[in-house]
Image (spheres, grey):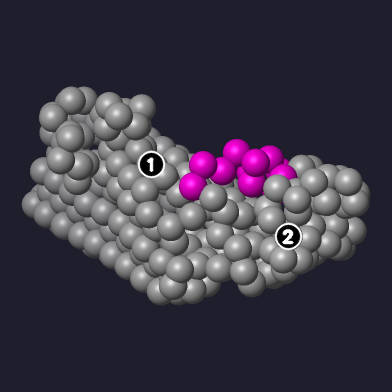
Protein backbone atom coordinates (compact mmCIF):
# COMPACT_ATOMS: atom_id res chain seq x y z
CA UNK A 1 0.00 0.00 0.00
CA UNK A 2 1.25 3.46 -0.91
CA UNK A 3 -0.38 6.37 0.96
CA UNK A 4 0.52 9.99 0.33
CA UNK A 5 1.64 11.76 3.55
CA UNK A 6 -1.28 14.19 3.36
CA UNK A 7 -3.96 11.47 3.02
CA UNK A 8 -5.97 10.32 6.04
CA UNK A 9 -6.70 6.59 6.20
CA UNK A 10 -8.51 5.32 9.27
CA UNK A 11 -6.52 2.46 10.82
CA UNK A 12 -9.67 0.32 10.94
CA UNK A 13 -10.12 0.46 7.15
CA UNK A 14 -9.18 -2.73 5.28
CA UNK A 15 -6.82 -1.85 2.46
CA UNK A 16 -5.65 -4.47 -0.05
CA UNK A 17 -2.20 -5.12 -1.43
CA UNK A 18 -0.85 -2.58 -3.88
CA UNK A 19 -3.49 0.09 -3.22
CA UNK A 20 -2.41 3.69 -3.89
CA UNK A 21 -3.96 6.62 -2.04
CA UNK A 22 -3.32 10.12 -3.41
CA UNK A 23 -2.85 13.52 -1.75
CA UNK A 24 -5.49 14.79 0.69
CA UNK A 25 -7.82 11.83 0.25
CA UNK A 26 -9.84 10.59 3.23
CA UNK A 27 -10.83 6.95 3.86
CA UNK A 28 -13.21 6.08 6.70
CA UNK A 29 -13.16 3.24 9.24
CA UNK A 30 -15.75 0.94 7.60
CA UNK A 31 -14.20 1.01 4.14
CA UNK A 32 -12.73 -2.03 2.36
CA UNK A 33 -10.64 -1.56 -0.75
CA UNK A 34 -9.48 -4.44 -2.95
CA UNK A 35 -5.96 -4.97 -4.23
CA UNK A 36 -4.31 -2.64 -6.74
CA UNK A 37 -7.05 -0.05 -6.65
CA UNK A 38 -5.82 3.53 -7.12
CA UNK A 39 -7.36 6.47 -5.25
CA UNK A 40 -6.59 9.89 -6.71
CA UNK A 41 -6.22 13.24 -4.98
CA UNK A 42 -8.93 14.77 -2.78
CA UNK A 43 -11.19 11.69 -2.85
CA UNK A 44 -13.50 10.87 0.05
CA UNK A 45 -14.54 7.26 0.73
CA UNK A 46 -16.76 6.77 3.76
CA UNK A 47 -19.64 4.76 5.17
CA UNK A 48 -19.87 0.96 4.91
CA UNK A 49 -18.27 0.83 1.49
CA UNK A 50 -16.57 -2.04 -0.32
CA UNK A 51 -14.56 -1.36 -3.48
CA UNK A 52 -13.16 -4.24 -5.52
CA UNK A 53 -9.81 -4.84 -7.16
CA UNK A 54 -8.13 -2.80 -9.89
CA UNK A 55 -10.52 0.13 -9.66
CA UNK A 56 -9.48 3.74 -10.19
CA UNK A 57 -11.01 6.78 -8.50
CA UNK A 58 -10.02 10.15 -9.92
CA UNK A 59 -9.73 13.58 -8.31
CA UNK A 60 -12.59 14.64 -6.07
CA UNK A 61 -14.74 11.50 -6.25
CA UNK A 62 -17.01 11.14 -3.19
CA UNK A 63 -18.09 7.57 -2.60
CA UNK A 64 -20.21 6.25 0.27
CA UNK A 65 -21.52 9.53 1.69
CA UNK A 66 -24.98 9.31 3.27
CA UNK A 67 -28.03 9.12 0.97
CA UNK A 68 -29.67 12.34 -0.20
CA UNK A 69 -33.02 11.14 1.12
CA UNK A 70 -35.02 12.99 3.77
CA UNK A 71 -36.28 9.64 5.09
CA UNK A 72 -32.74 8.52 5.88
CA UNK A 73 -32.36 8.47 9.67
CA UNK A 74 -28.72 7.45 10.09
CA UNK A 75 -29.23 3.69 9.81
CA UNK A 76 -26.32 1.63 8.57
CA UNK A 77 -26.46 0.86 4.89
CA UNK A 78 -23.97 -0.35 2.31
CA UNK A 79 -22.32 0.50 -0.96
CA UNK A 80 -20.73 -2.37 -2.89
CA UNK A 81 -18.58 -1.64 -5.95
CA UNK A 82 -17.11 -4.44 -8.08
CA UNK A 83 -13.78 -4.77 -9.86
CA UNK A 84 -12.07 -2.73 -12.58
CA UNK A 85 -14.39 0.24 -12.38
CA UNK A 86 -13.34 3.73 -13.43
CA UNK A 87 -14.86 6.52 -11.35
CA UNK A 88 -13.88 9.86 -12.84
CA UNK A 89 -13.58 13.35 -11.41
CA UNK A 90 -16.21 14.49 -8.88
CA UNK A 91 -18.49 11.49 -9.30
CA UNK A 92 -20.79 10.88 -6.30
CA UNK A 93 -22.21 7.48 -5.32
CA UNK A 94 -24.46 6.98 -2.28
CA UNK A 95 -25.21 3.83 -0.25
CA UNK A 96 -28.66 2.34 0.22
CA UNK A 97 -31.53 3.04 2.59
CA UNK A 98 -33.77 0.82 4.67
CA UNK A 99 -36.66 1.47 2.30
CA UNK A 100 -34.67 0.20 -0.67
CA UNK A 101 -33.04 -2.87 0.82
CA UNK A 102 -30.12 -1.08 2.45
CA UNK A 103 -27.62 -1.49 -0.38
CA UNK A 104 -26.40 0.24 -3.53
CA UNK A 105 -24.55 -2.16 -5.83
CA UNK A 106 -22.26 -1.40 -8.77
CA UNK A 107 -21.05 -4.29 -10.94
CA UNK A 108 -17.64 -4.63 -12.57
CA UNK A 109 -15.96 -2.99 -15.58
CA UNK A 110 -18.13 0.13 -15.43
CA UNK A 111 -17.21 3.71 -16.32
CA UNK A 112 -18.64 6.74 -14.55
CA UNK A 113 -17.60 9.95 -16.28
CA UNK A 114 -17.03 13.27 -14.52
CA UNK A 115 -19.81 14.68 -12.30
CA UNK A 116 -22.11 11.65 -12.70
CA UNK A 117 -24.31 10.84 -9.71
CA UNK A 118 -25.65 7.45 -8.54
CA UNK A 119 -28.23 7.78 -5.77
CA UNK A 120 -29.29 5.41 -3.00
CA UNK A 121 -30.46 1.84 -3.64
CA UNK A 122 -29.45 1.74 -7.30
CA UNK A 123 -28.41 -1.62 -8.75
CA UNK A 124 -26.09 -1.50 -11.75
CA UNK A 125 -24.79 -4.47 -13.72
CA UNK A 126 -21.47 -4.99 -15.47
CA UNK A 127 -20.00 -2.92 -18.33
CA UNK A 128 -22.34 0.01 -17.69
CA UNK A 129 -21.30 3.49 -18.86
CA UNK A 130 -22.72 6.61 -17.24
CA UNK A 131 -21.54 9.71 -19.09
CA UNK A 132 -20.75 13.20 -17.82
CA UNK A 133 -23.22 14.87 -15.44
CA UNK A 134 -25.85 12.15 -15.81
CA UNK A 135 -27.99 11.81 -12.68
CA UNK A 136 -29.52 8.55 -11.46
CA UNK A 137 -32.23 8.99 -8.83
CA UNK A 138 -32.88 6.37 -6.15
CA UNK A 139 -33.92 2.74 -6.72
CA UNK A 140 -32.88 2.63 -10.39
CA UNK A 141 -31.90 -0.69 -12.02
CA UNK A 142 -29.49 -0.70 -14.96
CA UNK A 143 -28.72 -3.99 -16.67
CA UNK A 144 -25.43 -5.14 -18.21
CA UNK A 145 -23.89 -3.17 -21.03
CA UNK A 146 -26.27 -0.20 -20.95
CA UNK A 147 -25.04 3.32 -21.74
CA UNK A 148 -26.48 6.50 -20.20
CA UNK A 149 -25.57 9.63 -22.16
CA UNK A 150 -24.35 12.93 -20.80
CA UNK A 151 -26.73 15.21 -18.87
CA UNK A 152 -29.41 12.50 -18.77
CA UNK A 153 -31.80 12.55 -15.82
CA UNK A 154 -33.44 9.25 -14.79
CA UNK A 155 -36.48 9.15 -12.49
CA UNK A 156 -36.68 6.98 -9.37
CA UNK A 157 -37.55 3.28 -9.86
CA UNK A 158 -36.86 3.31 -13.60
CA UNK A 159 -35.20 0.24 -15.17
CA UNK A 160 -32.77 0.41 -18.08
CA UNK A 161 -32.46 -2.81 -20.05
CA UNK A 162 -29.46 -4.76 -21.29
CA UNK A 163 -27.39 -3.04 -24.02
CA UNK A 164 -29.77 -0.07 -24.21
CA UNK A 165 -28.34 3.35 -25.01
CA UNK A 166 -29.90 6.64 -23.88
CA UNK A 167 -28.94 9.74 -25.87
CA UNK A 168 -27.60 12.86 -24.16
CA UNK A 169 -29.88 15.36 -22.39
CA UNK A 170 -32.80 12.92 -22.31
CA UNK A 171 -35.44 12.90 -19.55
CA UNK A 172 -36.25 9.32 -18.58
CA UNK A 173 -39.45 8.68 -16.62
CA UNK A 174 -40.35 5.18 -17.89
CA UNK A 175 -38.42 1.95 -18.33
CA UNK A 176 -35.95 1.78 -21.22
CA UNK A 177 -36.33 -1.54 -23.07
CA UNK A 178 -33.32 -3.82 -23.60
CA UNK A 179 -31.31 -3.45 -26.83
CA UNK A 180 -32.94 -0.11 -27.66
CA UNK A 181 -31.74 3.31 -28.74
CA UNK A 182 -33.68 5.99 -26.87
CA UNK A 183 -33.48 9.77 -26.77
CA UNK A 184 -35.74 12.72 -26.09
CA UNK A 185 -37.57 14.87 -23.58
CA UNK A 186 -39.22 12.58 -22.57
CA UNK A 187 -37.16 9.71 -23.95
CA UNK A 188 -38.65 7.69 -26.80
CA UNK A 189 -37.57 4.50 -28.54
CA UNK A 190 -36.06 5.04 -31.99
CA UNK A 191 -34.94 1.50 -32.74
CA UNK A 192 -32.37 -1.16 -32.02
CA UNK A 193 -28.94 -0.38 -30.62
CA UNK A 194 -27.30 -2.05 -33.60
CA UNK A 195 -23.78 -0.94 -32.73
CA UNK A 196 -24.13 -2.19 -29.16
CA UNK A 197 -25.42 -5.54 -30.40
CA UNK A 198 -22.51 -5.80 -32.84
CA UNK A 199 -19.96 -5.06 -30.14
CA UNK A 200 -21.58 -7.65 -27.88
CA UNK A 201 -21.25 -10.31 -30.59
CA UNK A 202 -24.98 -10.85 -31.07
CA UNK A 203 -25.61 -12.97 -34.17
CA UNK A 204 -27.28 -11.54 -37.31
CA UNK A 205 -30.14 -14.01 -36.86
CA UNK A 206 -30.85 -12.74 -33.36
CA UNK A 207 -30.63 -9.11 -34.53
CA UNK A 208 -33.19 -9.88 -37.24
CA UNK A 209 -35.54 -11.37 -34.65
CA UNK A 210 -35.11 -8.36 -32.36
CA UNK A 211 -35.68 -5.98 -35.26
CA UNK A 212 -38.95 -7.74 -36.10
CA UNK A 213 -40.02 -7.65 -32.44
CA UNK A 214 -39.19 -3.93 -32.19
CA UNK A 215 -41.30 -3.12 -35.25
CA UNK A 216 -44.28 -4.85 -33.64
CA UNK A 217 -43.74 -3.40 -30.18
CA UNK A 218 -42.83 0.19 -30.97
CA UNK A 219 -43.86 1.05 -34.55
CA UNK A 220 -47.01 -0.92 -35.29
CA UNK A 221 -49.54 1.31 -33.55
CA UNK A 222 -50.81 -1.66 -31.52
CA UNK A 223 -51.34 -1.47 -27.78
CA UNK A 224 -48.43 -2.92 -25.85
CA UNK A 225 -50.41 -5.97 -24.72
CA UNK A 226 -51.53 -6.77 -28.28
CA UNK A 227 -48.03 -6.15 -29.63
CA UNK A 228 -46.56 -8.52 -27.03
CA UNK A 229 -49.03 -11.23 -28.03
CA UNK A 230 -48.04 -10.73 -31.66
CA UNK A 231 -44.32 -11.02 -30.83
CA UNK A 232 -44.90 -14.21 -28.83
CA UNK A 233 -46.85 -15.76 -31.70
CA UNK A 234 -44.87 -14.59 -34.73
CA UNK A 235 -41.21 -14.01 -33.78
CA UNK A 236 -38.81 -16.93 -33.45
CA UNK A 237 -37.65 -16.95 -29.88
CA UNK A 238 -34.11 -16.53 -28.58
CA UNK A 239 -32.76 -15.63 -25.12
CA UNK A 240 -32.64 -11.98 -26.20
CA UNK A 241 -36.21 -11.92 -27.50
CA UNK A 242 -37.43 -13.70 -24.38
CA UNK A 243 -35.59 -11.19 -22.18
CA UNK A 244 -37.20 -8.30 -24.06
CA UNK A 245 -40.66 -9.81 -23.59
CA UNK A 246 -40.11 -10.53 -19.88
CA UNK A 247 -38.67 -7.06 -19.24
CA UNK A 248 -41.74 -5.38 -20.73
CA UNK A 249 -44.20 -7.66 -18.95
CA UNK A 250 -42.52 -6.94 -15.60
CA UNK A 251 -42.52 -3.16 -16.07
CA UNK A 252 -44.29 -1.22 -13.33
CA UNK A 253 -43.73 2.30 -14.66
CA UNK A 254 -44.47 1.39 -18.26
CA UNK A 255 -41.99 1.22 -21.11
CA UNK A 256 -41.14 4.27 -23.18
CA UNK A 257 -42.33 3.99 -26.79
CA UNK A 258 -41.81 5.77 -30.10
The 10 Å Cα crowd at callout 1, few under 14, some 14 to 19, many 20 or more, is many
Q: Which residue is depicted at the point 83% across and 51% down?
A: 230
Residue 255 spot, x, y in % from top left: 57, 54
Please, what secondary structure does the residue beneath circle 2 have? Answer: loop
Circle 1 sits on which residue?
139
Specify start and end residues of the magenta stretch as a single range.
243-253
Q: Dividing the image into 4 quarters, which one contains the N terminus?
A: top left
In the rendered view, would you say 88 is above or below 37? Answer: below
The picture places residue 114, in percent across and down from the top left corner, at 32, 66
* Residue 115, quarter of the rendered image: bottom left
Magenta segment includes 247? yes
In this picture, is 36 found above or below 165?
Answer: above
Whether residue 157 is visible here, answered yes or no, is: yes
Could you tell me which residue is drawn at 47 percent across and 63 percent down?
148
Q: Which numbered circle lies on residue 229?
A: none
Q: Nearer the viewer, residue 56 or 119?
A: 119
Quarter where residue 9 is shown? top left
Would you say the magenta stretch is mainly helix, strand or loop? helix
- Secondary structure under tag 1 reads loop
Q: Position of residue 49 (x, y in %)?
A: 28, 35
First-in-chain label (1 vs 2): 1
Q: Disc 1 to disc 2, how far (Cα)?
A: 30 Å
Amino acid sequence: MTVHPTAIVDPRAVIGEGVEVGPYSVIGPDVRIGPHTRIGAHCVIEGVTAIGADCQLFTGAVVGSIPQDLKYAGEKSELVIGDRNRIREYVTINPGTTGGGGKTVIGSDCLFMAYAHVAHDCLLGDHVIVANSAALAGHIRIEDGAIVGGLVGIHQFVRVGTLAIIGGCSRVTQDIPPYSTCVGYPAKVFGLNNEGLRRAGVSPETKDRLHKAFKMLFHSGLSMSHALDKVVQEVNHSPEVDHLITFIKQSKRGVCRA
